Image: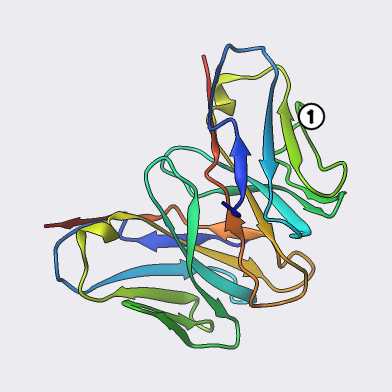
Amino acid sequence: KQEVTQIPAALSVPEGENLVLNCSFTDSAIYNLQWFRQDPGKGLTSLLLIQSSQREQTSGRLNASLDKSSGRSTLYIAASQPGDSATYLCAVSLSGGSNYKLTFGKGTLLTVNP
Amino acid sequence: DTGVSQDPRHKITKRGQNVTFRCDPISEHNRLYWYRQTLGQGPEFLTYFQNEAQLEKSRLLSDRFSAERPKGSFSTLEIQRTEQGDSAMYLCASTPRAGSELETQYFGPGTRLLVL
């Protein structure tokens, strides 16, 4: 059974700081890995999707890396802003017939202080 | 707004009552998913539709839960004889087509259920 762990559970940083969120998964036979953002009481917004054959993806100030063999991914946020405050969720799908089914971590609650 | 929509956004009910939630996916998305998220946890997969066919149900979906997508467009999730443990956010997501590593799931705002 795939298990996804996110560290740290919560992180508080001053505005402008660069930061890294970590995600690990137990089964390396993944189809893809996604990072989502969730604001309090709201749904999820997809930030980045990394295919199993890729090593990283970038979007603006966000960069996500994937090391499938070690079962790890990181989300790097550059020059953090108060508007980045949210919960960040990592999710993986397994290769094979159920590649549509996402397994999520519990998330990292990020607070960026002005 | 052309995103995934869910109705209602909030529902408070008494234990033992039945509730029904609706999800309208993005137009022409043929895959639809339901997830449940409890406080402090990530979403957990419940069920998946491709067009009108329900292709997988998680063991989390007990006999009290039923989901339908009768015309391959909107979907409903019904919970019968609600229990306090059913209190959660119910999230719906959709994707445009099968078989692409590039597809991402587009999530709705969720329905927050509180069972008293």
Which residue is located at x 54 percent, y 48 percent? B43
Identify whether A51 is placed above or below A98.
Answer: below
Instruction: Report which quarter residue A77 is drawn in.
Output: bottom left
| Residue A75 picture location, percent across and down | 37, 73
B103 relative position to A91: left or right: right
Which residue is located at x 71 percent, y 68 percent? A99
| Residue A4 picture location, percent across and down | 50, 61
| Residue A98 picture location, percent across and down | 75, 64
For the C terminus of chain A, the quadrant is bottom left
> How many residues crowd around disc 1 within 10 Å: few (fewer than 14), some, or many (20 or more)?
few
For the N terminus of chain A, the quadrant is bottom right
Which residue is located at x 63 percent, y 67 percent? A93
Residue nearest the viewer, comparing B64 with B72: B72
What chain letter is assigned to the residue under label 1?
B
Instruction: Report which quarter residue A2 is drawn in.
Output: bottom right
Q: What element carries label 1?
A: loop
Q: Mark 1 points at which residue?
A: B63
Residue nearest the viewer, comparing B97 with A97: B97
Instruction: Report which quarter residue A30 is drawn in.
Output: bottom right
| Residue B110 picture location, percent across and down | 55, 41
User: Which amino acid, mark 1?
Assistant: Asp
